[in-house]
Image: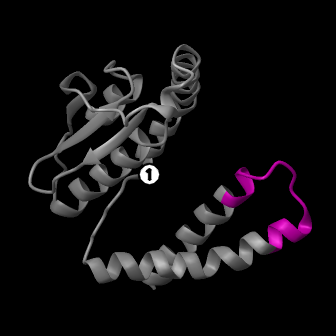
Amino acid sequence: MTRLVEVAVWWLVLVLFWLATLSATSRAEFLVALIAGLPCAVAATAARAAGGWRWRVRPAWSRWLVPLIPAAIADTARVLARAAREPRAGRREPHRVTERELRRIPLVAGEDEARSAGWRAVAAALMSATPGTVVLDSPPEEPVLLVHDLDGRPSRLEGVVAR
C-alpha cells in the first residue's frame, strides 16, 4: 500500500511538472502527461527502493516553496546581468570555481536517519531549483550542503533550508 501511495505522489508531481512546462495545455498534452508520468513514477519509486534510500518528509516543508519564486526571479536577473556583462563567456576557457563561490550550508539534523535524509533531499532540490545555485554534495554523515553560487552571495533560500 505504501508503494502505491509513493507511485501516486510521484505520478502527480511529474504530471503537474509536465503541465507547468507547457505554453498551452490541450487535452492531448494532458493525456500524454498522464501516460508518460506513470512509468516515470514507477521508475522513481523502484530506484529509491533499489538504492535503499529512506526519506521521510513533512508536509510543513512545502512552505519552502513560497520563497522559491522570488529567489528564482532574483537569480534569473543575476544570471542575465552576468551574461550581459560577459557576452563572450561561452567562448573562453571553462569557469574555474573559486573558494568564494563555494559555501557549506549547515542543516538541522532530523529526529531519525530517514527524516534527516528527507530534509537533505528536499533542501538540495530547492537550492538547485534556481539558476544561480547548484548543490554539489550532501554527505550523509553530516547535515550540510556544499553549494556553488554564481557570485558568492547567500540567497534567501539558505535561511529557509538551514533552519
The picture quadrant where one finds residue 98 is: top left
Residue extending farthest left: 141
Q: Which residues are magenta?
A: 18-31
Q: Residue sitting at 64 percent across and 56 percent down?
A: 17
Residue 8 screen position, x and y as percent: 57, 74
Viewer-nearest residue: 102 or 64? 102
Q: Residue sitting at 47 percent across and 38 percent down?
A: 63
Residue 66 screen position, x and y as percent: 53, 33
Viewer-nearest residue: 57 or 99? 99
Residue 75 visible in the shown view: yes
Viewer-nearest residue: 113 or 130? 130
Q: Is 19 within the magenta?
A: yes
Residue 163 visible in the shown view: no
Describe residue 117's horizontal placement relative to residue 43 as left or right. Answer: left
The picture quadrant where one finds residue 127 is: top left
Residue 65 screen position, x and y as percent: 51, 38
Q: Disc 1 designates what residue?
A: 59
**Could you tell me the amino acid type at mark 1?**
Pro
Q: Is 27 within the magenta?
A: yes
Q: Residue sitting at 74 percent across and 57 percent down?
A: 19
